[in-house]
Amino acid sequence: MDEGVSLHHDYYDIFERRRKDSIGGGIAVLIDKNLKAFDYTHKDTEHVLCLKILGDGTHKGGHIFLLTTYFPPKNKENALKDLEEAIEYVKKKYKNPSLLILGDFNLEEKGHEI
């Protein structure tokens, strides 16, 4: 995300991870302010943003973990490792967590290899 871009909104909470060694880019997630969401990222990484979204208690305790990731074209291995660590972190804390994983995986055309 560009330093000059303001990410403020009246109806959404904005969570973000900026790229460390680059101008621009990163991960951003906007969550409706009517939902209770918290940053649950287990370590300082630019590749994964993990949010814990509290529900109304009707589905597996009501929590959904949203993991958003970015796999840079030239550094997919580190990004994959960070995503795997984030998933394992949540699974150690919660039995059978509800996970939603979204991202820009920059998959190759041939065989969609990571």
Image (cartoon, helix red, strand yellow):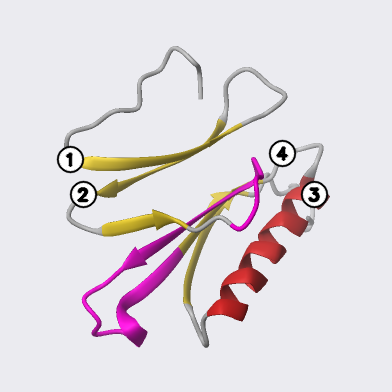
- State yes or no: discs 1 and 2 in contact (Cβ < 8 Å): yes
Q: Nearer the viewer, mark 2 or mark 4?
A: 2
- Measured in 3D between alpha carbons, the distance from the residue under mark 3 to the one under mark 4, in whole angstroms, is 9 Å
Query: Is residue 63 one of those drawn in magenta?
Result: yes
Query: Is residue 51 one of those drawn in magenta?
Result: yes
Residue placed under numbered mark 1 in the picture: 11
Q: Nearer the viewer, mark 4 or mark 1?
A: 1
Residue placed under numbered mark 2 in the picture: 33
Mark 1 nearby-residue class (10 Å; few <14, some 14–19, many ≥20): few
The local secondary structure at tag 2 comes to loop
The local secondary structure at tag 3 comes to helix
The local secondary structure at tag 1 comes to loop
The amino acid type found where label 4 is placed reads Pro
- State yes or no: discs 2 and 4 in contact (Cβ < 8 Å): no
- Measured in 3D between alpha carbons, the distance from the residue under mark 4 to the one under mark 1, in whole angstroms, is 30 Å
The dot on residue 72 is: 4
The dot on residue 21 is: none
Q: Is residue 20 positioned above or below 84 on the image?
A: above
| Magenta-drawn segment | 42-65
Label whose residue precedes the other's in the sequence (1 or 2):
1
The amino acid type found where label 2 is placed reads Lys
Q: Which of marks 3 and 4 is in front?
A: 3
- Locate residue 108, reporting x and y percent: 75, 47
**Which sits in the foreground, 63 or 108?**
63
- Measured in 3D between alpha carbons, the distance from the residue under mark 2 to the one under mark 4, in whole angstroms, is 30 Å
- Locate residue 12, reporting x and y percent: 24, 42
Q: How many marks?
A: 4
The amino acid type found where label 3 is placed reads Asn
Residue placed under numbered mark 3 in the picture: 78
Label whose residue precedes the other's in the sequence (3 or 4):
4
Q: Is residue 23 positioned above or below 111 on the image?
A: above
Q: Nearer the viewer, mark 2 or mark 3?
A: 2
